[in-house]
């Protein structure tokens, strides 16, 4: 029976050739496997809902026609890979010896482990007025990929939950589809690294590998796309990958620290695509949202905080992003514990906040080392990892020195502490500070650059 199915199915595949694009054939039709015939119907296994729906939407007429010709059957019926075992059992489709095993479409995908951060789920994402729109959009995309917003473009400042949401979509889809859908998460940096690395080996082989990694995704999540700015070759490849996925009805979700129109080249090339999707900002949390976030973090981390200090803290932490709020909470908690207080109360929290040089809350001006790094990275097109890392190329040394200079100027902390942030000793930090300090005096461009960055920090 199996051989018969396979043989006739081969005719169906051949019938498709030349009638649809080669990519369509590879991506959708070749992923199908016939499993059973009953009455006037051919039962076909699809690896996932997306494949099934695409075939139903786009290729059904051709499929019906070819099945009729080759199997002499009038109808096709689909089941999903995940329902396959049950179907086999229910219909008593025992395998006879010598038969090939029953179809295991994309089996290698199912054994993979969930690659997403288990903490970054929709359940752990606090929804307030400042992020409810983006939450709803992300949720809709996770529940109905492609059908709702494609592409979905999420932008907003650092530490506001972009990566969290991308992982939440990943976790959600993963749990539901049990790995039967190919979902790829990639940071722009990783995308770039893969691209350049593969090109170094053999151009042809490299490109083929690169493409199959990204272009066979059903859903692709791209984090921090802003780093694509200024990298021509990469933009080119990204554009092709994006187009390819989009044309094949795949879901694309992108995050960025700025709206598409501020990544000029990207916007120009993809603007028509963006218009079919949704571009949504994720905003700084308001007071009420900050309170909810503080409560949630305390609950998740198992901290003991006196309830009365929550509104006070929420008020104090205005202009802090969520990553910084998490940092402050953990610092306060450890500080309290260090001073023999298992439950954090207002007095000890105040004491800690007073002592922390980084949190200059008393004057309402909140400049942190994090904000300085973020602004420098943004202005100079480098990543946080690069600035904090070991590499010493010129493109990285200068942003690093500027960070050090700005920390010295804006944060009331010792040079040795600044050095530690960059894993360097205080003489290196002092050298960096002096160098930039001198440059500002002699070089107009440097002066302008520094004032632009400072404007960004204080925005
Ligand atoms: P981004 O990618 O925008 O820089 P992240 O997604 O990395 O920010 O978020 C920084 C931290 O803040 C993470 O630990 C994340 O879990 C947390 N966070 C962000 N937004 C929320 C939210 N709405 N509810 C709960 N935690 C959040
Ligand atoms: Mg992020």
Image: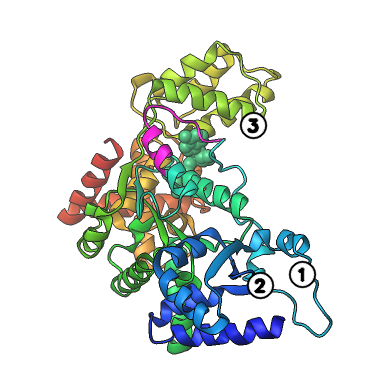
> Does the Cβ of the disc 3 residue fall within 8 Å of ligand 1?
no
Cα separation between marks 2 and 1: 9 Å
For marks 1 and 3, the one nearer the N-term is 1
Q: Secondary structure at mark 3?
A: helix
Q: Percent x, y for residue 17?
A: 43, 86
Q: Secondary structure at mark 2?
A: strand
Camera-side residue: 352 or 61? 61
In which quadrant of the rendered image does the N terminus lie? bottom right
Q: Bin the neighbour count of mark 3 within 10 Å (Cα to Cα): few under 14, some 14-19, many 20 and up.
A: few
Please give the name of the residue rendered at 64% of the width and 63% of the height, measured from the top-left corner. 81
Residue 277 visible in the displayed image = yes
Q: Secondary structure at mark 1?
A: loop
- The answer to whether mark 1 and mark 3 are in CB contact below 8 A is no
For marks 2 and 3, the one nearer the N-term is 2
The magenta-colored residue range is 124-137
Name the residue carrying label 1.
93
Name the residue carrying label 3.
301
């Amino acid at each position: 029976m199996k051989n018969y199915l396979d043989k006739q199915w081969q005719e169906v595949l051949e019938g498709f050739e030349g009638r649809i694009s080669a990519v369509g054939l590879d991506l959708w039709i070749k992923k199908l496997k016939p499993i059973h015939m009953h009455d006037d119907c051919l039962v076909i296994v699809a690896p996932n809902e997306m494949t099934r729906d695409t075939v139903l939407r786009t290729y059904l007429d051709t499929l019906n026609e070819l099945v009729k010709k080759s199997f002499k059957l009038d109808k096709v019926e689909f089941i999903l890979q995940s329902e396959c075992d049950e179907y086999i059992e229910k219909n008593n489709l025992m395998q006879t010896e010598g038969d090939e095993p029953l179809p295991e479409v994309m089996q290698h995908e199912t054994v993979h482990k969930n690659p997403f951060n288990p903490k970054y789920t929709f359940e752990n994402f606090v929804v307030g007025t400042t992020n409810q729109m983006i939450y709803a959009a992300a949720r809709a995309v996770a529940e109905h990929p492609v059908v709702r917003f494609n592409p979905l473009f999420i932008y907003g400042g650092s530490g506001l939950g972009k990566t969290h949401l991308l992982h939440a979509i990943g976790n959600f889809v993963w749990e539901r589809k049990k790995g039967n859908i190919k979902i790829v998460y990639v940071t722009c940096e990783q995308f770039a690294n893969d691209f350049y690395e593969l090109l170094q080996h053999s151009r042809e082989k490299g490109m083929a590998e690169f493409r199959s990694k990204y272009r066979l995704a059903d859903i692709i999540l791209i984090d921090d796309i802003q780093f694509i700015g200024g990298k021509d070759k990469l933009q080119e490849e990204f554009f092709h990958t994006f187009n390819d996925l989009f044309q094949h009805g795949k879901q694309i979700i992108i995050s960025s620290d700025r709206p598409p129109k501020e990544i000029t080249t990207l916007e120009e090339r993809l603007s028509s695509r963006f218009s079919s999707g949704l571009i949504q900002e994720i905003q700084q949390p308001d007071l009420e949202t900050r309170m909810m976030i503080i409560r949630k973090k305390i609950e998740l981390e198992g901290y003991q905080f006196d309830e009365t200090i929550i509104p006070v803290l929420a008020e104090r932490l205005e202009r802090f992003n969520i990553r910084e709020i998490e940092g402050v909470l953990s610092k306060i908690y450890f500080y309290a514990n260090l001073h023999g207080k298992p439950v954090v109360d207002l007095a000890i929290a105040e004491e800690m906040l007073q002592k922390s040089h980084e949190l200059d809350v008393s004057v309402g001006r909140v400049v942190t080392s994090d904000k300085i790094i973020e602004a420098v990275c943004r202005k100079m097109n480098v990543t946080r990892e690069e600035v904090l890392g070991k590499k010493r190329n010129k493109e990285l040394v200068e942003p690093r020195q500027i960070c050090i200079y700005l920390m010295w100027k804006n944060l009331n902390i010792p040079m040795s502490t600044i050095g530690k942030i960059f894993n360097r000793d205080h003489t290196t930090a002092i050298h960096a500070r002096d160098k930039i300090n001198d440059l500002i005096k002699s070089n107009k461009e440097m002066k302008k650059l520094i004032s632009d960055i400072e404007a960004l920090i204080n925005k």
